[in-house]
Image (cartoon, grey):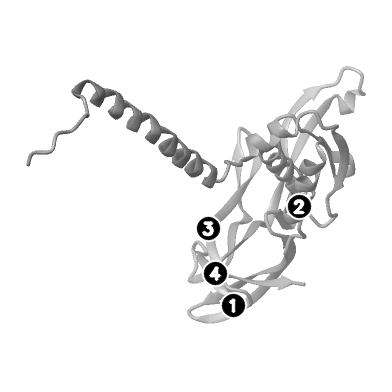
Amino acid sequence: MTRTSNLRLDTLPRIALGITLLSLPLFAGASSARAQEQPPASNQAENCSAARGVAADTRTFYLADTAPRYAQGEVSSALHNALCSDARVYDVESERAIVVQALPDQLDLAAKITHDLDRPQTSYRLTYTLTELNAGKTISTEHYSMVLASGQQLTLKQGTKVPVATGSYSNANASANNSVETQFTYLDIGMNFVATVEPMANGVQLHSKIEQSSLAQPSTIEGVTEPVVSQTVLETTSLLSPDKPRMLGAIDIPHSTRHTDIAAVIEPLK
């Protein structure tokens, strides 16, 4: 026996539509649940925007006396970059201080950044040793020591100042015997050291400029005797290990069989 159905063909579209409408809230609910599971985005810009309307405050941060002068500019630059755009950062160089006007949470962040960056610089004792040799035999040894902090450039000079006439002129108000006055400048003759040290992961980087000068046979130009200066310059960058001497170079002494070896050793100070 064949069973007939009372379902009319014109009702099928309405039934399909009903199934579709019933399924939409289920998918919508699933999408809503997935949206709630994702954590909200959080970044510095949103934090700054969310905090608008909160009263700003002002705090002053003093840098340590042992920190170099240039460190203040570096700390100020870090604060400008890390804080919200509406924060105000002012340098007071005479007091070695930084004034920050910002929201309370931003002031706490500024305090942490300042504390992390404002650290005492390591100091070193740097010693240059100049050894003069002749045919492999040591003739003399000289030591030049200095104390400097990391990042600091230090100059050490030892020698004499030699006057050199640079010009002369007539003085109408002077007496007849002293009517011509001569102007002089002075040359530094001797040893001149310029050093900068920077701590590295595997030692200390030393940049050195060493000048050695002496007077040679003077020269006469148009009846004026002028001094002649012999000069040798050694400029180098080396990586030093603490308490271990390192050879920087050697200087030959003209018109002789002698030469001078230049070495350096560095010692961290506590």
Q: Is residue 201 left or right of residue 141?
A: left
Residue 139 shows in the view: yes
Any mark on residue 8, and which? Answer: none
Distance (Cα) linking label 3 and label 2? 38 Å
- How crowded is the residue under tag 1: few (<14 C-alpha within 10 Å), some, or many (20+)? few
Q: Which residue is mark 1?
A: 244
Q: Which residue is mark 3?
A: 236
Amino acid of disc 4: Asn
Between residue 241 and residue 255, name the one nearer to us.
241
Q: Is residue 242 left or right of residue 249?
A: right
Q: Residue at x 87, y 17 (%)?
A: 172
Distance (Cα) linking label 2 and label 1? 37 Å
Q: Nearer the viewer, mark 2 or mark 1?
A: 2
Q: Earlier in the sequence, mark 3 or mark 2?
A: 2
Q: Quadrant of the C terminus?
A: bottom right
Distance (Cα) linking label 4 and label 1? 13 Å
Q: Nearer the viewer, mark 3 or mark 1?
A: 1
Q: Earlier in the sequence, mark 4 or mark 1?
A: 4
Q: Which residue is mark 4?
A: 202
Between residue 267 and residue 21, name the one nearer to us.
21
Q: Earlier in the sequence, mark 3 or mark 1?
A: 3
| Residue 100 percent coordinates (x, y) | 82, 38
Distance (Cα) linking label 3 and label 4? 18 Å
Any mark on residue 112, and which? Answer: 2
